[in-house]
Image (cartoon, grey):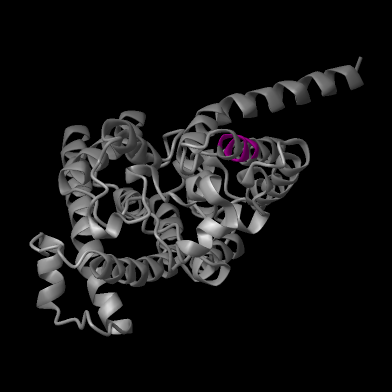
Amino acid sequence: MLFKADYGNAPGGGRRRILRIQLLALLPVMLAALVNSGYQYFQGMALLPEFDGSDLRSRLVGILSVNPEAPGLYDYLAAGLAHVLPMLLLALLVGGFWERIIADRRGHPMEPGFVLVALLFVLLLPGAAAFSHIIFGMSCAVILGKAIFGGDGKSFINPALLGIVMVQVSYPAASVLHPLWSGMAGYAGSDAIALYHRGGEQAMAQAGIDTWSAFIGAIPGTLGTTSLLAIALGAALLLLTRVISWRLLAAQFIGLLLFVWLAAAFSDPSADVHSMPLHWHLLLGSFAFGAVFIACDPVASASTNPGRWIQGFLIAGLVVLIRVTNSTHPDAVIPVLLLVSLLAPLIDHAVIAWNIRQRARRHV
């Protein structure tokens, strides 16, 4: 299993192999993001026929000769590409710009890790994120989340996570009027959890959200978080290649099951969200994506096996706690992942200290 120190100290070829696997694991997620963003775009256009379509993304959609009246797979992919590709290219450009400056200042070659940071960052954004916000967020991700710690593998927090947190905190009132932002709570993600708070299963049905559409990813949400199917495919590759820890991943999903059951058993039964089934906690919001691609990042997670179990249960417990007690919070995953990432070194320290005390007692 890959340890944090192993990644940070691995030779360049080893880090590039890991990077290639991580990028390959994100391919099905990106494909699902393209299709769903195009689908959501046409859904939004149908709901807002007065939208003039004068923005850059809509003009690109027009150039690609899509059929908005009866869209098919090509039309969804083309519209999705028109929205996602400019965002990704801009994120790569900004990340590469700062990476080049940092490399020149340190006299080292450029590190390729900014490519993964850019992809993860974009997949945590809604399909209509402002370009100026992408520049700001990616700058924070590369400079504050990676460069100041020494580069790839040296940080204790996922740079993309830090970038999205900075965008969420800095632009909490970002416009939600664009068609692609229908059903969204700005940069905080899908509004589906809050929708369940307000009306339970009936509200979900009225919004056109069912189990199948949520599983394949045909619902509103940030780009990479809507398709549990695509996320599961990426997780399978990361587990088979041992890039991520199965213990940490299992702890998050087992913890989610446990804490959802506790919330339903010991909370007010009249509150819909307290009895929200486990599958909705998995399908709505960004829990699955965060669990696989952010929490299990070998650089930003606990390195000890007991620490991984503790970290995973802590993530699941806090996510469920916030979701069932705060009706205004849309998802809870991003702030929880940030908090627990900051606690990961402390968790490892406590585990190691406990092991030392136990060994000392046995030899007394």
Residue 210 in which image quadrant? bottom right
Q: Main secondary structure of the magenta part?
A: helix
Please say whether residue 274 is one of the residues in the magenta stretch: no
Answer yes or no: is residue 297 visible.
Answer: no
The x, y position of residue 352, in whole percent, is: 70, 26
Answer yes or no: is residue 276 visible.
Answer: yes
Q: At 48% from the left edge and 49% from the top edge, which residue is drawn?
A: 195
Asked if 334 appears above or below 36 in the picture, the reply is: above
The x, y position of residue 155, in whole percent, is: 42, 34
Please say whether residue 319 is one of the residues in the magenta stretch: yes
**Quadrant in which the C terminus appears:** top right
Q: At 18% from the left edge and 46% from the top edge, which residue is drawn?
A: 94
Q: Is residue 157 left or right of residue 54?
A: right
Residue 23 in which image quadrant? bottom left
Q: Of residues 344 and 320, which is closer to you in this image?
A: 320
Q: Which residues are magenta?
A: 317-322
